[in-house]
Amino acid sequence: MAKNPEHRDLFPGALEIMILQSLRLKPMHGYALVKHIKQVSENLLQVEEGSLYPALQRMLREGLLEAESGISTKGRPTRIYRLTSAGIRHLENEVVSFERMFAGFNRVLAAAKA
Amino acid sequence: MPLLGRFFRNRRYDDIAVSIQEHIDERVEELMEEGMPRTEAERTARRDFGNVTLVQERSREVWQWQRIESLLADLKHVFRRLRRSPGFAVTVVLTLAIGIGANTAVFSVLNSVLLRPLPYPDSEQLVSLHLNAPGAPGLSEFRSELRLSPSMYFTFATHNRSFQSLGIWGPGTASITGLAQPEQVNTAQISGGVLETLNVPALTGQWLTAADQDSHGLGRVMLSYGYWQRRFGGDPGVVGRTISVNAQPRVIAGVMPRGFKVLNYDFDLLVPIALDPVKEILAGFGYRGIARLRPGVSIPQANADVASLINTWMDSWSNGPGTNPHWYVNWKITPALEPLKTTMVGGIQTVLWVVMGMIAVVMLIACTNVANLLLVRADARQQELAVRSALGAGRWRIARELLVESLTLGLLGGAAGVAVAYGGLHLLTAVGPVNLPRLSEISLDGRSIAFTLILSVSSGLFFGTIPVLRYVPSRERVALLGAMRSASANRERQRGRNLLVMTQVAMALVLLIGAVLMIRTFLAMRNVDPGFSGPASLQVMRLSIPETLVGDSATVVRMQNSIVDKLAAIPGVSSVGFTASVPMSGAEPGWDQIRVEGQNYLNENAPMRLYNYVSPGYFRTAGTRLIAGRDFTWAEIYNVRPMGIVSENLARELWGSPAAAIGKRFQELPTMPWHEVVGVVQDVHENGVDQVAPATVYWPSLMMGDPSAPEKLVVRRSVYFAIRSDRAGTQAFINEMQQAVWSVNSNLPVANVNTMQDVYSDSMARTSFTLVMLAIAGAMALALGILGIYGVISYAVSQRTREIGIRMALGAKKNELVWMFVRSALVLTVVGTAVGLGAAAALMRLIRTLLFGVSPLDPVTFTVVPVVLVAAAALASYLPARRTSAVNPVEALRAE
């Protein structure tokens, strides 16, 4: 799991938000999630597998996700993760608090420039 | 965990595995689509994904109840591995069980005797009124303490400002008649204040009070629980009944509860000391004092208080007209109060700490052996550990498993150890000195169990950490591990084990030196002529003739004489005599000065001499040699001839030689008649062979007391009869003795029936107990140490088979190879011995007080033990080293 120095560590909670947001679009399996985040962020963000799978299990335990047996894009059996209504609520709350945090963050940065 | 939960969880785990597998597969396909060959694509995909097992483990952990589950898994793994090597498991658990068990047993004794508070309420307030009299010659060399006189008790009790209560007491005996057979019982004579000080309420009835001690007062008695049960069947109506004590009617005031003792003294009857404040004098230093401090008063404050009262005491009392009460200034009487516990525990404290220390060292050696075994085991797993590490198992993960294994072993050993301790305690209280204080209180309690638990866990951690430090690879070493496969010897590994063996040898040496010093002490004590001979065929018994039974002194002697004759008529008896005190029985008749004719004693602080009183024939019976002169005769006794016999050391001190002493005269007080020395006997070790033999004066058993009233004779009413017979100690003989006594007077009870051998052995009990314990510890240490050496050499041989093969192929002789291994063992032993000698030299000082007739740095011991140890080590290494000669070079080289 060598860390790629180009990708900086995400702050706590960021991975969960991205997973939730991605799964809101459509249910996906693990590999698809990784690819999706990579593509959407235009290679700026890369999810580490070492963090992804424990994070998925954590969210499953908290009831934010559901897992069901499914078929991957290549036609092999895998587990498809789907957002639950609790997951949607959690995502919305988190997005609000993130936006607030970013707003504050931006103001501090702007003040520092001025 | 419930089955259903487990089922779901296992499905969950499968889900994770499936997801990850698909993840990697998909990545491989993608890479292949980009034109990468399959093998390379697979490798890249796996590398990019990282450690699959670790990711799986972390994903699973989300579902686990904290980390307990993986710990349980470790535990399951450990048990499986132990089951697969039962020999190893049993060896380790047994070693630990013995080590931990022995430690728990000794700790329980230590805890019960030294650590637990005394069985009295607020016992930390209790002190013993210990006085020192360094200025009392004769006495101070023999005994450090000056006991209290009744006048001191009156002064201290009235004027002190430090104590809630205080009292004096002493052991005694009394004849009880009128119940069943006449019986001699042990009494505690107590003044007022003793029961208030100890503050244990009566079971029924009331305490004796100060009113009881008035010689004209109530004079009631109290019963011990045991005596109450034995003689009265626990009858609650006993209070108020009258019993005959020394032929005097006494009312029973109450019964003390079960287990109550006056300090260490287990009495049958509490009897008030009869005191008359009008008639008391300064002297009469015969009682032990105890007191309860007022809250907030410290021992130094109480000492200062008592010190100021010594003057008050000399001002208030006298020894009779014409004596100077302030003469006692010469004695330099100083209070040295000590906690009552210190007095009760006495000299056994050192013994127990020494035994505890030794047993702890044995435990360390045992742990070292186990650590060695674990090292060998971890060595065998080295490949596995390396592989697991390479697969990404964290260092902590591997360390945890090794530690779980050693902790499990430790706890298993501890559990078995409790059983060993339980048995060991029974053994210990059986072989322990009979006079071990607080023996009846010894038990396994919560503190002992906590001690066992701590010991198990800490020993588990101790011997578990060593392999962890050696074998859990750091990141840098992971790569190296594979290369070690064919290495012949791994010096670093071997060094760890060598260090352990050297430590073991050093510790074993210390214990063995301690054991040998104790053996030499025991032998030295056995070589001391105690002042009597043939103790096994010397029967002693105590007999008192109370004043209420026979009033006249001369009649008492005649009665004692006829008992002597009756006893001598028993078949198999060769001689009989009696004395006021047999050596080592703890019953000292008294101390006083003597005045030698022709010397001026006006201002001199004359030394104190031990007084004893003997009948004719006593010395011959006891086997005490006459150095000069002759024994008393019965005719002289009845004629009250003023004569005496002195001990050899006293004769030399006063008159230069035993022969010169014969015919010389001495007296007790200026008003007393001169006594002529008729004989000189060898020195007798009154308080045990390791104590100085006191200068002793033997008076005839019937003497003139007050010259102004020559018809009033003084006699010893309580004496020990000594009977020389090969039948001594048999029950039939004791019965015949009892019959012989009853044929003279049927109201006479006998007590303290013993052979002199019992008395003698009891006086050596502390030494023999220490000796037995040290010998056991030393033997265990030696066995474990030798086992350690054997194991290390044997392992080295098996590991270096390849090297041996090469050497042999190159022409090395078998003897040289054997010598090579023996030499390496000898180097370890010699280094360990050197370290051990240094440690022993420092540590043996600690047991100096237990030694007798041998220096703590005894050159013989310090030479012989190392030589024996090195020889044993040579043998222990030779046996496995010999196996090298069985090595076939061809097969050895093919082995790997």
Image (cartoon, coloured by chain):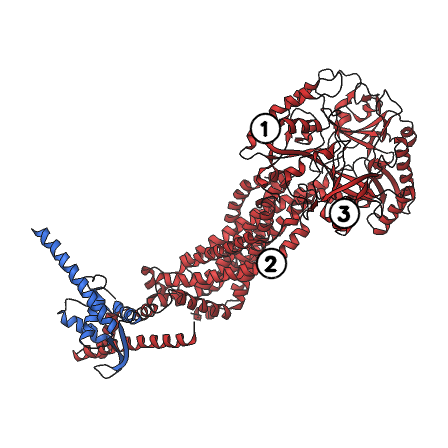
Q: Amino acid at mark 3?
A: Val
The residue at which mark 2 appears reads as B420
What chain does mark 1 sit on? B
Q: Position of residue B812 (x, y in %)?
A: 48, 61
The residue at which mark 1 appears reads as B161
Q: Quarter of the image containing the C terminus of chain B?
A: bottom left
Local packing at callout 3 (Cα closer than 10 Å; few below 14, some 14-19, many 20+) is some
Left or right: residue B604 versus residue B76 is right
- Residue B623: in sight, yes or no? yes
Q: Residue at x 85, y 20 (%)?
A: B708
Specify the farthest residue to the bottom. Answer: A75
Q: CA distance from mark 3 to mark 2?
A: 44 Å
Chain B tint as drawn? red
Chain A tint as drawn? blue
Q: Considering only order in the chain, which callout, 2 or 1, is on the residue closer to the N terminus?
A: 1
Q: Are marks 1 and 2 on the same chain?
A: yes
Q: Amino acid at mark 1?
A: Arg
